[in-house]
Amino acid sequence: MAVPKRRTSKAKKGHRRSHHNLGTGMGVQYCPRCNEPVLPHRLCENCGFYRNRDALALTDKAAE
């Protein structure tokens, strides 16, 4: 049975795991209608615009 001869140091362990935290993350896009920041593949919460159409009809609370 294979058993490590020495304990793995914190530095060695950190070097081995250094790529675990790498990532590009989600990019922020901007709504073409109102120019508000929006996550990709989600409708704009400000104006309800998604994929060149009104996906959500938002009502103005001040008009009510």
Image: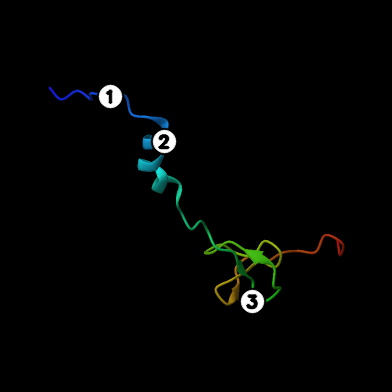
Disc 3 designates what residue?
A: 32
Is 44 on the left-hand or right-hand side of 15?
right
Label disc, if present, on residue 38 of the rendered structure? none
Q: Which residue is mark 1?
A: 6
Q: Is residue 19 left or right of residue 52?
A: left
On the image, the x and y values in percent for residue 9 come to 38, 29
The image quarter in which residue 62 lies: bottom right
**In the structure shown, which secondary structural element does the residue marked by tag 3 occupy?**
loop
Tell whether 9 sits left or right of 45. Answer: left
Q: In x, y percent, where is residue 31?
A: 64, 71
Determine whether label 1 and label 2 are within 8 Å by CB.
no
Label 1 to label 3: alpha-carbon separation: 58 Å
* Point 76% across, 64% down: residue: 59
Task: Looking at the picture, tell me which residue is in the foreground, 31 or 43.
Answer: 31
**Residue 11's mark?**
2
Name the amino acid, label 1: Arg
How many angstroms separate mark 2 from mark 3 (CA)? 47 Å
Question: Regarding mark 2 in the picture, which secondary structure is present there?
Answer: helix
In the rendered view of the protein, which quadrant contains the C terminus?
A: bottom right
Q: Is residue 11 above or below residue 53?
A: above
Q: Residue furthest left?
A: 1
Q: Position of residue 54 (x, y in %)?
A: 62, 72
The residue lying at 39 percent from left, 48 percent from top is 19
What is the quadrant of residue 45 in the picture? bottom right
At label 2, the amino acid type is Ala
Between disc 2 and disc 3, the foreground one is 2
Q: Answer yes or no: do the residues labelled 2 and 3 have beta carbons within 8 Å?
A: no
